[in-house]
Image: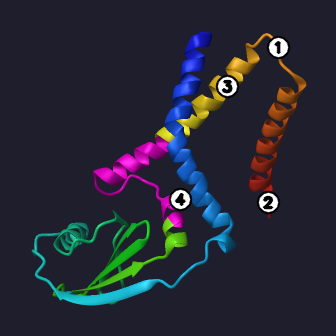
Amino acid sequence: MKKLMQKIHLYTGLGLLAFVVMYFFSGLVMVQPKLFPSGDTEKSTRVEQVRIPAALDVDEAGEWIAGKFDLRGQPQPAQKLNDGRVRYRFGRPGTNLTALLDADKRSVEIETARWDFRRLMVGYHRIHGYRGNIVWLLWGLMYDLASAGCILFAVSGVWMWATARERDKVSWVMLAIGIGFTLTMILYLMLMP
């Protein structure tokens, strides 16, 4: 059993390494913005004439527009506006695309916003969910696997520590600090005003 736990600990650690480093670096950019100056967002807008097939519903029309004008990114739910227009948004790290379909469905206004390095890293940090094509689904799966890997890594590490012949005082202190901090944060977040 000990060899199995060591292998689980080793392989989950190796599998998590690249993902956790990326997550750490993108988080560092978020918490230390002064180290990574922000530039202006490049925005461009264009209007395109369209002939959307009548049989398409609102969501299918968004997919059609995305395919026709190469609007790549994770799709967000369509928003129906009060004036009859429909807004479609597609996001990927570093780029945000918005397609605004006119109420008569004859033209679409496409706005492209390209962000600087700092906002690109924040975009990587915040990607989530299972929406979009296979690439977005795989990214969401990687997030979930990384979460499961973190749990396995911690559990296997604690199990190896608990079954070791000798446990030093430093490891007891580190375990107590980790558990205490986690419980404190859970209570604080549940009870904060």
Query: How far, Cα to Cα, is label 3 from label 1?
Result: 15 Å
Instruction: Choose the circle earlier in sequence order: 1 or 4.
Output: 4
Magenta highlight range: 121-144
Question: Is 107 situated above or below 1?
Answer: below
User: Disc number at residue 192?
Assistant: 2
User: Disc number at residue 157?
Assistant: 3
Question: Is 86 situated above or below 23?
Answer: below
Amino acid type shown at disc 1: Glu
SS class, disc 4: helix
Q: Residues within 10 Å of mark 3 (few under 14, many from 20)?
A: some
Task: Give percent across and percent down for residue 47.
Answer: 23, 90
Task: Give percent across and percent down for residue 56.
Answer: 15, 69
User: Disc number at residue 166?
Assistant: 1
- Residues 170 and 154: in front is 170
Amino acid type shown at disc 3: Gly
Task: Give percent across and percent down for residue 126.
Answer: 52, 60
Place residue 46 in its image quadrant.
bottom left
User: Disc number at residue 125?
Assistant: 4
